[in-house]
Image (cartoon, helix red, strand yellow):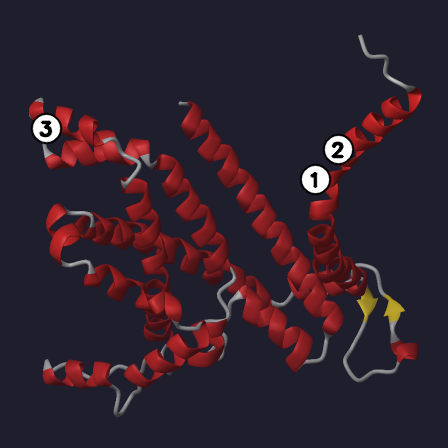
């Protein structure tokens, strides 16, 4: 029997330590990247939210003002109104996304579409390839009051032209259309991937037992893919709450302040009105709202999965 020397024991110990440290060394660059570009700026912004910080002001003018920025932003009627519109926008947009995404995915997942019409899958993904600003500019041309194709079709039908930017309700509808058009393909892709996880023998057994298509959809398909639905809702809600590009490009918050979202109010407070402290306070209030909503949603979704 070979006798292990003390040197060999030390070598084995060093190798084991190297293997234990290897995973941490691999993720260390990513952790440093997140700390430098995310955590440190967030903490710095948190400090600024408690200061009287204005763009262009000298450093000597920066001073600690406690909760004044938070009180000021919460007493701003435009910011309070933007919270209600932002959540209304997110609710309507995500609800339509789910219905449209599921409907289109069911059509594309049909055997006929799978065999000879694969090109349609690529066409439905095209809106995802456009930047939000480009999509907003394109729709702004379509919704133009005088020469826009949308108003032309409305006039052909004998209806009065609509001011899609000048009136509150049409402006909100137009922003919803822009967001739904650009985000529905994402939901379609997730639903198509979810349908691939459903066992075909389970569907065939249900058909043999005489189950209708609606029964198969609501009693078999949807319960199986409920985790994918939760994924779509969580991602889309957080994305819809952060709506910014389409509002800035299409209406710039108008008419008046009717289409201002939380993001646009924070942006204008910080950079248009040069109140960096107030903008940072609004951003952290927005952060708390999103975290609270996410925690509530995760709690409710986990409860549904357990049931």
Judge the density around disc 1: few (<14), some (14-19), many (≥20) Cα neighbours within 10 Å. few
Q: Is residue 163 above or below residue 126?
A: below
Judge the density around disc 2: few (<14), some (14-19), many (≥20) Cα neighbours within 10 Å. few
Q: Which residue is mark 3?
A: 207
How far separated are the C-alphas under marks 1 and 3? 49 Å
CB-based contact (under 8 Å), mark 2 and mark 1: yes
How far separated are the C-alphas under marks 3 and 2? 53 Å
Q: Mark 3 or 2 closer to N-term?
A: 2
Q: Which residue is mark 2?
A: 20
| Residue depicted at x 54% and y 45% | 293
Instruction: Point out residue 134 in the picture as x, y percentages from the top left corner.
Output: 41, 78
How far separated are the C-alphas under marks 2 and 1? 7 Å
Determine which of the numbered discs, if any, sits on residue 186 in the image. none
Q: Is residue 117 above or below residue 203?
A: below
Q: Which residue is mark 1?
A: 23
Residue at the far top: name it: 1
For the residue pair 210 and 168, the one nearer the viewer reads as: 210
Instruction: Point out residue 23 in the picture as x, y percentages from the top left corner.
Output: 70, 40
Q: Secondary structure at mark 2?
A: helix
| Residue depicted at x 31% and y 36% | 197
């Amino acid at each position: 029997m070979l006798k292990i020397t003390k040197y060999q024991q030390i070598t084995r110990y060093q190798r084991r330590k190297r293997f234990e440290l290897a995973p941490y060394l691999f993720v260390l660059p990513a952790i440093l990247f997140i700390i430098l570009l995310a955590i440190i700026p967030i903490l710095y912004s948190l400090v600024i939210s408690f200061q009287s910080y204005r763009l262009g002001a000298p450093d000597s003018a920066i001073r600690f003002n406690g909760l004044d920025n938070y009180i000021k932003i919460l007493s701003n009627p435009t910011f309070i109104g933007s919270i209600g519109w932002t959540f209304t926008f997110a609710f309507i947009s995500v609800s339509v996304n789910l219905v449209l995404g599921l409907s289109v995915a069911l059509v594309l997942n049909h055997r006929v579409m799978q065999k000879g019409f694969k090109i349609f899958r690529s066409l439905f993904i095209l809106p995802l390839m456009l930047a939000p600003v480009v999509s907003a500019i394109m729709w702004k041309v379509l919704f133009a009051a005088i020469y826009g194709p949308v108003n032309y079709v409305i006039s052909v039908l004998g209806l009065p032209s609509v001011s899609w930017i000048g009136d509150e309700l049409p402006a909100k509808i137009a922003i919803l259309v822009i967001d739904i058009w650009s985000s529905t393909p994402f939901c379609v892709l997730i639903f198509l991937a979810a349908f691939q996880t459903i066992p075909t023998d389970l569907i065939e057994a249900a058909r043999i037992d005489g189950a209708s298509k609606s029964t198969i959809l609501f009693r078999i398909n949807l319960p199986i893919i409920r985790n994918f639905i939760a994924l779509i809702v969580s991602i889309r809600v957080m994305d819809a709450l952060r709506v910014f590009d389409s509002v800035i490009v299409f209406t710039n918050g108008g008419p008046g302040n009717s289409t201002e979202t939380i993001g646009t109010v924070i942006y204008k407070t910080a950079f248009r009105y040069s109140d960096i402290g107030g903008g940072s306070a609004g951003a952290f209030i927005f952060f708390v709202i999103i975290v609270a909503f996410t925690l509530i949603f995760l709690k409710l979704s986990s409860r549904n999965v357990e049931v």
